[in-house]
Amino acid sequence: MLSLQNLSKDYDGFRALDDLSLEIPAGEFFCFLGPNGAGKTTTIKIITGLLKPATGKAIIAGHDIQAAPLEAKRQIGYIPDTPYLYEKLSGRDFMHFVGNLYGVPRQEVQAAIDKYFAAFRIAHAADNLIENYSFGMRQKLCFSAAFMHKPKVLVVDEPMVGLDPQSARTLKNMLREFCRDGGTVFLSTHLLAIAEELCDRLGIITRGKLRFLDSVDDLRRQMAREGNLEDLFLELTNDGVTNTEESPFTETESIAKEA
Amino acid sequence: MSNAAIPNETPLRGSPREERLSDEVLESHHTRVVIGAKLRIAWNAVRHIKRHLYLHAAAGFTLMIVLLGVGTGMFHLIFDFLNRQPVFGAPLMDRLVGIVLLIFFSMLLFSNLIITLSTTYLSKEVEFLMGLPVSRQAIFRQKLIETVLYSSWAFAMLSLPLFVSFGIVRHAPWYFYPLIVVLVVPFLMIPASLGAIFTMLVTSVLPARKTRTLCIVLGILSLMLTGVLAKVTGLSQLLATADKQDFLQIMNVLGVGNSPMLPSAWLSGALQAIAPADPLDRDLMRFGYWLAMLLATSLFLMEVTRWLVPSLYYRGWCLSRDAAVKEVESNAKFSPFRIIDAYLERWFSSPTAGLLSKDLKSFWRDPSQWTQLVILLGLMIIYITNLGYSRQYSKTIMLVVNDWRLLLSFFNLGATCFILSILTTRFVYPMLSLEGRGFWTVGLAPIPRSRIIWQKFILCLALCLGVSVPLMVLSNFVLKITGPFVLISYAAIIIMSTGLTSLSVGIGAILPDFKEDNPARIANGIGGTMNVLLSLAYIGVSVFLLVLPTIALSGNMGAVAAQWLPAYVAIFLLIQAVLIWLPLRIGLRRWAEMEF
């Protein structure tokens, strides 16, 4: 469903993404992990066509995002981590706007508004201007808009930030249901518990290179140790870090853990 | 004061005197810290200018120098002409300076009101600073300095040519020029403090967003009132039909600018006192008196501001946050937008209708957008109503062209296009930049990127034609233009509106500013400056190409010129087609390749 083939990207001589290849089948919940600046957002932007790769291809449901962008984009739903929304539109206006862009009939847009606004508990604010929405409400509106055109691949960047526990649970259920119905979720997050709880497979990226690609259990097996995902993640992503870049808190934390 | 004076370990507080002293120390420390951070931001911005942006910065700087030079030249031309007139020339020049400074003062007052509200109450930075242990006095003081800087740059650009040409024409001594700075600083603080006081008083009872709309509406009304008053007092007619008998009447009308109650009159009085070339004619006592008036008033108003801050600022700021959330009308059964949406969906494809509806709603629901448009339309109405009088000026230039109305019509075409270029720079150019931050929505939709550019072009062209064509119809009517020029003027305005729209949309795609979400600031940037510059060049070239055959046809070689006319028209249309096509073509290509 989502195929990334030898993707590379440079910024002013800095290699942000280095020969990244991934195959994510239909119905899979895939988590993409990595420290800040590892190349997660660059990957997402290439998948969604907001950036052009230096080399390689991103294929969405059989369509190359660069060669056939319109066909590919019809299959994607995207939720950015800090979405910019049109402040002077109401939530309802925004849904109709996105519906128009994707050619969703008006009745279906209305049905989506009723369904998702009720699920995320923002129906009371449907006719308020977005400028009055809190961060969490904006996030919920983005999810509602992303689900509306029934995409095959959902690309999600830091989904739980700003959501209340009830809405976070609703979202998790929706994402699971989306995968059960044959959809593919590509989720980038820093919340390792989310990855541990939801994902079928995970990929860990550092410095633009994919360091690990398999399930959490396999990760534990490969690292030949038990423990939670956070420990494994830190061990994997600290690989190759020079002494000068080490945090002064690392040692203290280790001592605390040992104690 | 050094950082050692800041009470980190040894508290300064104790007696009431010490308490007050420590508050002042803290306040000035906080002000310095925040201003220091701002300076650091500015310095970092300069240091990190990318290589390709140097060219833009150089173009902007050159444009600024050219504008200052042209402004100085224009003022010099007027002042020199007046100064050479016997008896009434010099006093008329003084009164003119008084009137111009009064206009600048009114503009400063208005812009200070609006900017104080934006920077001191509605900015996100204030929200951040309010959460820190920074005194409210310090926040307000720093924001007041910011307001003065924001509101004064336009005054500097406009007044510098006036002061310099005044000094040159009067052969003023060298110290005239540095003393301008001494006079201008307290002069600028007066409208800034008045704006701050008014804002604090109004925002303590009205939420800041409503106050800003109120101020803009008040500004529009006062602008209209000025136009009406100018008519009532007969100023326009007097200037149009002036002869020596009317001189005293003109002097009386212009005397409004020299009323001793106005700070602008104090500034112009001080300038007049030290400008004369002959030392015996200089009146240092009068200069000192006006300078003292400026200093005393500005210091008094600043102290009043400082006195009001503790009781009113925080109250007003909180009120601006408490404003009730209002539902919008789009879901109501008979909402105008529901009707508009229905028509848009009938006439356009679904994505284009969506984009058009979004742009119209965003524009209508932002008063800071449409009220500026209303101001510009108000200026246009004042311009047209005064066109009738300009017919009388033109009798003197009949020697150049047989029909003076024709010449005036060309001038009118140029002026209409100039107003249109201000509109396109302010409203059309920023549109694509504003899409940048929301590109995760529009850019991910299954529509070609070129659709976004064409949608902006269609919308803006329709709006521009909606403004420019009625303006041309009205001005042709006021000027009593008849015959073939009526058709020529309509064809020209339609072609040039298309050209100006294409230029603004094209430059919007070539030089977007995705970091800024305030359209006014986007228009003030490098891209906006380039847009104005190229629009003016386009208008100049187009009007020149239109004037050329008209002069040829009305001259001695009229018959020969008539033979070449069809070929000339074909070439003119070809040039226009290229000028319209080129920016759009480059813009479309650049937009298609852009990364976000």
Image: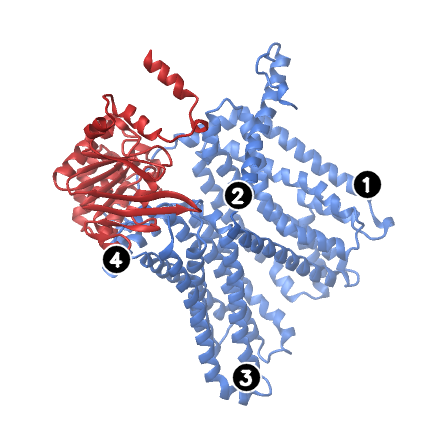
Chain colours: A red, B blue
Q: Residue B285 carries which label?
A: 1
Between disc 3 and disc 4, whose residue precedes? 4
Depth check: give the residue in front, B112 or B30.
B30
Query: Which secondary structure lies at badge 4?
Result: helix
Mark 4 or 1: the one toward you: 4
Mark 3 or 1: the one toward you: 3
Q: Which amino acid does label 1 sit on?
A: Met
Between disc 2 and disc 4, whose residue precedes? 2
Query: Which secondary structure lies at badge 2?
Result: loop
Residue B499: percent from left, percent from top: 44, 66
Q: Which amino acid does label 4 sit on?
A: Tyr
One can see residue A152 in this view: yes
Mark 3 vs mark 1: tell me if same chain.
yes
Q: Is residue A181 left or right of residue B318?
A: left
The CA span between labels 3 and 2 is 56 Å
Q: In this view, does B297 lie to the left or right of B494?
A: right
Mark 3 Cα shell of 10 Å, populated few (<14), some (14-19), many (≥20): some
Q: Residue B343 carries which label?
A: 4
Depth check: give the residue in front, B2 or B73.
B2
| Residue projecting furthest to the left | A181
Q: Which amino acid does label 3 sit on?
A: Leu
Q: Mark 3 points at which residue?
A: B553
Q: Is residue A14 left or right of residue B103?
A: left
The CA span between labels 2 and 4 is 48 Å
Mark 2 vs mark 4: tell me if same chain.
yes
Query: Which secondary structure lies at badge 1?
Result: helix
Mark 3 vs mark 4: tell me if same chain.
yes
Mark 3 belongs to chain: B
Query: Which secondary structure lies at badge 3?
Result: helix
Q: Which amino acid does label 2 sit on?
A: His
Mark 4 belongs to chain: B
Q: In which quarter of the image is residue B3?
A: top right
